[in-house]
Image: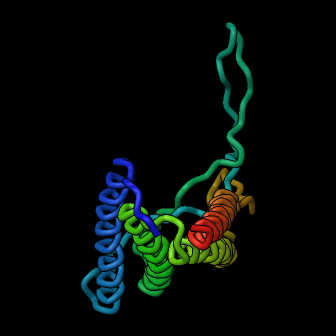
C-alpha cells in the first residue's frame, strides 16, 4: 500500500501518547509497589484512604438562598462525595489497591493499543488489518472495562457505602453508569468498520491497477 504524507497533528498526537503512556507506566508500577508494601508494617496504623463514594447523598439540613430580595428554601440532594477512611484497615486498603491495579491493567492496554494505532498511521499505514483489529480490540476492552467498573462500584456500595452512618446525611443508591464508555466503544467499533471499508476499496483499486 502506498504511504501518504502524515499530517503534523498525528506526529503531535504520537508524542503526546508516548508521554501519557510513560506516565501511566509509572502509575502502574507505583500501584504494584504500594500493594507489596501493604503486606508489611511500613504504613502502621496511620494510613488514610480517600475513595469516590458509590451512590449519592442527600443532606437533611435545609438552607436558604437569596433571590430578588427574598429568601428561597433549598436542600442539597443527590450530591457526589468522597469517603475519607481514618486509620484505614490494611485489608481494606489491599482490596482497593487490587481494584486500582485492575483499572491500571485495562487502561494500560487501551493506551498502548491506541499508541500503536497512532504510530502506524503516523508512518502512513492507515487502512490496514492491524489498525482495524486494534480499534475493535479497544472497543471490546472498553466494554469489559465498563462492566468491571459497574461491578466494582456496586460491590463497594453494598459492602461499604451502605454501612456508613453519618448524622444529617442520607445515602441513596444512585449510581453513575458511565454511558460515555459505551459511546466511546461504539464510536471505535464503527470507526473500525469504516477502516475495513477503506481497506476493501484499496484492495479493489490495487487489483484494478
Residue farthest along the left direction in this orientation: 42
Quadrant housing the C terminus: bottom right
Count of picture labels? 0
Q: Residue at x 33, y 56 (%)?
A: 16
Q: Position of residue 118 (x, y in %)?
A: 42, 64
| In front of the other: 187 or 106 | 187
From the viewer's perspective, is residue 28 above or below residue 198?
Answer: below
Q: Is residue 96 left or right of residue 5?
A: right
Residue farthest along the front direction in this orientation: 209
- Taking the spot 71% from the left edge, 11% from the top edge, the residue there is 70
**Residue at point 46%, 87% (across, down):** 91
User: How far from the left and from the top, in percent, is residue 191?
Assistant: 63, 61
Q: Position of residue 92 (x, y in %)?
A: 49, 82
Nearer to me, 132 or 161:
132
- Above or below, comparing residue 112 to residue 98 in the picture: above
Q: Is residue 23 left or right of residue 74?
A: left
Amino acid at each position: 500500500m502506498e504511504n501518504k504524507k502524515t499530517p503534523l497533528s498525528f506526529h503531535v498526537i504520537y508524542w503526546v501518547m508516548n508521554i501519557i503512556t510513560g506516565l501511566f507506566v509509572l502509575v502502574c508500577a507505583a500501584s504494584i509497589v504500594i500493594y507489596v508494601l501493604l503486606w508489611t508494617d511500613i504504613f502502621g496504623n496511620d494510613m488514610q484512604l480517600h475513595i469516590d463514594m458509590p451512590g449519592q447523598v442527600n443532606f437533611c439540613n435545609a438552607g436558604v438562598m437569596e433571590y430578588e430580595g427574598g429568601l428561597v428554601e433549598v436542600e442539597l440532594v443527590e450530591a457526589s462525595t468522597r469517603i475519607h477512611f481514618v486509620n484505614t484497615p490494611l485489608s481494606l486498603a489491599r482490596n482497593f489497591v487490587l481494584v486500582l491495579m485492575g483499572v491500571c491493567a485495562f487502561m494500560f492496554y487501551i493506551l498502548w493499543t491506541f499508541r500503536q494505532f497512532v504510530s502506524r498511521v503516523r508512518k502512513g499505514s492507515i487502512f490496514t488489518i492491524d489498525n482495524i483489529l486494534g480499534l475493535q480490540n479497544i472497543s471490546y476492552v472498553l466494554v469489559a472495562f465498563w462492566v468491571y467498573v459497574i461491578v466494582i462500584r456496586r460491590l463497594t456500595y453494598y459492602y461499604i457505602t451502605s454501612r456508613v452512618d453519618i448524622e444529617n446525611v442520607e445515602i441513596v443508591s444512585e449510581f453513575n453508569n458511565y454511558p460515555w464508555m459505551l459511546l466511546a466503544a461504539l464510536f471505535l467499533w464503527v470507526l473500525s468498520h469504516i477502516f475495513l471499508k477503506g481497506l476493501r476499496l484499496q484492495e479493489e483499486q490495487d487489483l484494478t491497477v
